[in-house]
Image: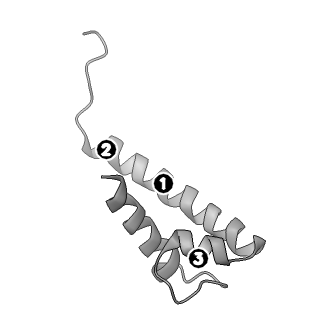
């Protein structure tokens, strides 16, 4: 569900991308609330890139619906 997506997103932005300004907290929302504007901008960029990849992956993996039905 959405909780799992947020966990994966947090893992990507905080642990994998290692953005400057990230706190020791693995929670993305906590990092955003404690961070500065530069961190917020970078986290937003990474989040959008991750979600774009996720959307493309889902489109490739999920069966397409017949639009004529």
- How far apart in space, not on screen, are marks 1 and 3 (Cα)? 18 Å
Q: Secondary structure at mark 1?
A: helix
Whether residue 63 is situated above or below residue 12 in the rendered picture: above
Q: Which residue is mark 3?
A: 31
Image quadrant holding the C terminus, namely top left
Mark 1 / mark 3, whichever is N-terminal: 3
Q: Which residue is mark 2?
A: 60
Is 12 situated left or right of 4 in this image?
A: right
The residue under the point 42% across, 47% down is: 55
Contact (Cβ within 8 Å) of mark 1 with mark 3: no
Question: Height in image: 13 above or below 22?
Answer: above
Residue 9 appears at what percent x and percent y?
Answer: 44, 65
Estimate how packed mark 2 is, as few (under 14), some (14 to 19) or many (20 or more) residues with alpha carbons within 10 Å. Answer: few
Q: Which corner quadrant of the image does residue 38 belong to?
A: bottom right
Where is residue 43 drawn, in percent x and y?
62, 68
Residue 24 image offset from top left, x and y in percent: 52, 90
Residue at (48% x, 54% y) in the render? 51
Which residue is most to the bottom?
24
Instruction: Give the distance between the C-alpha atoms of the residues marked 2 and 1, in whole angstroms.
Output: 14 Å
Front: mark 1 or 3: 3
The residue drawn where x is 58% and y is 86% is: 23
Snapshot quadrant of residue 20? bottom right
10 Å crowding of disc 3: few (<14), some (14-19), many (20+):
many
Report helix, strand or loop for mark 3: helix
As drawn, the label of residue 51 is 1
Q: How many marks?
A: 3
Q: Position of residue 64 (x, y in %)?
A: 27, 30
* Structural distance between the alpha carbons of marks 3 and 2: 32 Å
The residue that appears at 66% across and 78% down in the rendered structure is 34
Q: Secondary structure at mark 2?
A: helix
Between 19 and 36, which is closer to the camera in this rendering? 36
Could you say which disc has been placed on residue 61 in the image? none
């Amino acid at each position: 569900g959405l909780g799992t997506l947020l966990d994966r997103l947090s893992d990507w932005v905080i642990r994998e991308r290692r953005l400057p300004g990230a706190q020791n907290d693995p929670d993305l929302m906590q990092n955003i609330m404690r961070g500065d504007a530069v961190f917020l901008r970078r986290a937003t960029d990474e989040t959008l890139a991750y979600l774009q990849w996720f959307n493309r992956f889902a489109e490739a993996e999920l069966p397409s619906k017949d639009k004529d039905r």
